[in-house]
Image: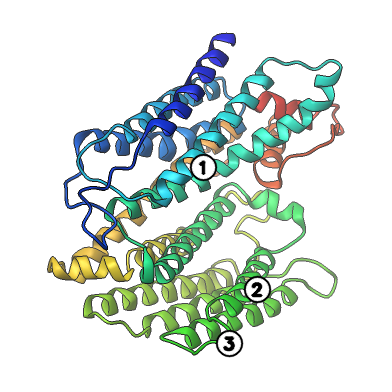
Amino acid sequence: MGGISGLWSVAGLCLVRTAIAHEHHDDKIPEGAAVSPDPIDTTLWIHIVIQIVTFGILFPVGMVLGILRSRWHVPLQTVGGILTVLGYLLGHAHGGRQFKYNVHASFATTLMFILIVQFAFGIYLKLHLERGFHGKVRKYAVITHGVVGKMMPVVSWVQMLFGGITALGYCRDDHLGQCLAHFIMGSAFIGYGIILTILLLVGQTWLRRTGRSQEFFDSLLIAAWGCVNTFTEHRWGGPWVKNDLQHTSMGIVWWCAGLLGVWLSRKRDGQPKRNLIPALVIILTGWGMSAHPQGLELSTKVHTVFGYTLMAAGAARIVEIAFVLRDRQSLDDQNGEEINSWQYLTPFLLYASGFLFMGATEEQMALLSSAHVTHVSYILILYSLAFLLFLYVAMLLHLYAVQAWPATAAKTNNLNGTLQRPNGHLERRVHDAEEFELQGLISEDDDNPDGVKTGSRVRDETE
């Protein structure tokens, strides 16, 4: 363990020295541009591949293994850390295309600091120092390590987006506002799809324990987002320009509908109740975006398909709640394991909507239009990315499920395909895993009725 600590100390010093020594050469960048016309060299391509593999695959898989208390968690995260350092150094050693100082470079330093802190907490927890002062500090270290670990996929996604934007020299000057709108909103749709997938595949038990319907949380988030949009889409006191009025009115619809959805999410006796308000908001948003005025024909067609895709997601959600589930939380009211194939449709369409919206910025549309790329081929590529992301998320959740429910996965009736319930010991393990994964980190040590501790001990072993 001391060797790993020394390795990260040396890595930290190397990163600091490299960051200080690295200069952002821009002598080949034309005036008014953000990047030089030179091609991306091999070194930078290797940097891109390494960081995508590390932050996009290894760290998320390692996070799932950590939640499951797998012995492979530490080795995988260690390999990811070593590759991260290598990729960081290559990112400061490339030739070819030059870049002005950019958000990807500045955020990389912050990201590396977060990683170093995360690994430091991980090493500290593996030492199992529990006496005296360490006994008081340890529970806070567990909470910090867990929160930062679950935050890493989001932070990694942001940094990868920054990387793509920087590589093309986009989102500067007058393009910044619409660029932020497209990437933030597109990422929000993808994030919503991922949350729906998690709740569908592994989160039904947790959702029941909250005593709330899923529409309560959806409506609450929609209302909050609507309030932000209402007051940020227009510079109050200035003239109304371009699509300010449409964006602001869309924000008003969101918080109005969100408040109604929250109210309708409970019965008179306080029990959770399903409703269709969030789905209606998705349909209205898609309709508004499909009629969004654009400057290029290609952009108009992409926005139209984006709007139709979002409307389809809302319509699929209505069919799911009203006709497939018939206002129930799930098909199987006992354990929520039975899933209808129709239920996969809404999350996928949200993934696709997110990619379509992120891929429809002004600069991207201008580049594709000048290259004579048709909207059909471009949209099919974006849908392909949605399929791949859905596959990846499903694989991560499958990895979690087969480890958290090993007996459930193995005991399948060959005659009718129904799953047998696990024994009491396994049920306690499932409860622990779901508590850690979906309900958050617990700060107290609580004993269950069988005397099995499910608080800090579980989290310590996980880390």
How much space separates mark 2 and mark 1, taking CA atoms? 29 Å
Question: Is label 2 in contact with label 3 (beta carbons under 8 Å)?
Answer: no
Residue under the image location 28 percent in, 43 percent down: 25
Residue under the image location 84 percent in, 32 percent down: 445
Which sits in the foreground, 89 or 186?
A: 89
SS type, badge 1: helix
How much space separates mark 1 and mark 3, taking CA atoms? 48 Å
| 10 Å crowding of disc 3: few (<14), some (14-19), many (20+) | few
Residue 360: give x, y in percent of width and height.
32, 69
Nearer the viewer's eye, disc 2 or disc 3?
3
> Is 413 left or right of 369, judged from the image as shown?
right
- Lower sequence index among marks 2 and 1: 2
- In the image, is residue 213 above or below residue 92? below
The disc label shown at residue 237, or none: 3
How much space separates mark 2 and mark 3, taking CA atoms? 24 Å
Amino acid type indicated by mark 1? Leu
Give the residue at the far left of this rendering: 372
